[in-house]
Amino acid sequence: VTTKHLKSGKEAKMDFMVMENLFFGRTISGVYDLKGSARSRYNPDTSGSNKVLLDQNLVEVLRTKPIFLGSKPKRVLERAVWNDTSFLA
């Protein structure tokens, strides 16, 4: 998207990525913004609702509360991760 300042005429270009709202109509117990990195990916403030946690927060939680998946949901998750990383590559 390119915007143009009305008085100066200066243009600014911005790139947008639009995603569907996966949370609509659902009760969400936790949100993680995962980037696949451990560097600066920990949010020490985990209190309160609507708190977005990071990669290292998930690693910390999984030590005591692992996610168990059956074979079919595991394959679906693996395929989704594969598709996403292939797209981003």
Image (spheres, rainbow, N blue to C red):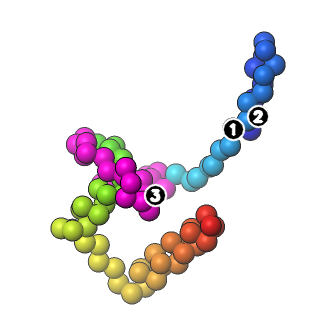
Label 1 vs 3, first from the N-terminus: 1
Asked if the residue at tag 2 contacts the one at tag 1, i.e. Cβ–Cβ closer than 8 Å, the answer is: yes
Question: Quadrant of the image for the N terminus?
Answer: top right
Marks 1 and 2, how far apart at CA: 6 Å
Question: Quadrant of the image for the C terminus?
Answer: bottom right
* Whether residue 14 is situated above or below residue 20 in the rendered picture: above
- Left/right placement of residue 66 relative to residue 19 reads left
Asked if the residue at tag 3 contacts the one at tag 1, i.e. Cβ–Cβ closer than 8 Å, the answer is: no
Residue under the point 24% across and 62% down: 61
Residue 14 visible in this rendered orientation of the protein: yes
> Where is residue 9, by image quadrant?
top right
Residue type (three-letter) at the residue carrying disc 1: Met
Instruction: Identify the residue position indicated by label 2 in the image.
Output: 2
Residue 32 visible in this rendered orientation of the protein: no
Residue under the point 25% across and 45% down: 44
* Helix, strand or loop at mark 1: loop
Q: Nearer the viewer, residue 60 or 25?
A: 60
Residues in magenta, as a range: 22-48
* Helix, strand or loop at mark 3: loop
* Helix, strand or loop at mark 2: strand
Residue under the point 42% across and 53% down: 33
Instruction: Identify the residue position indicated by label 3 in the image.
Output: 35
Label 2 vs 3, first from the N-terminus: 2
- Left/right placement of residue 12 relative to residue 69 reads right
- Left/right placement of residue 28 relative to residue 16 reads left
Instruction: Identify the residue position indicated by label 1 in the image.
Output: 14
Residue type (three-letter) at the residue carrying disc 3: Lys
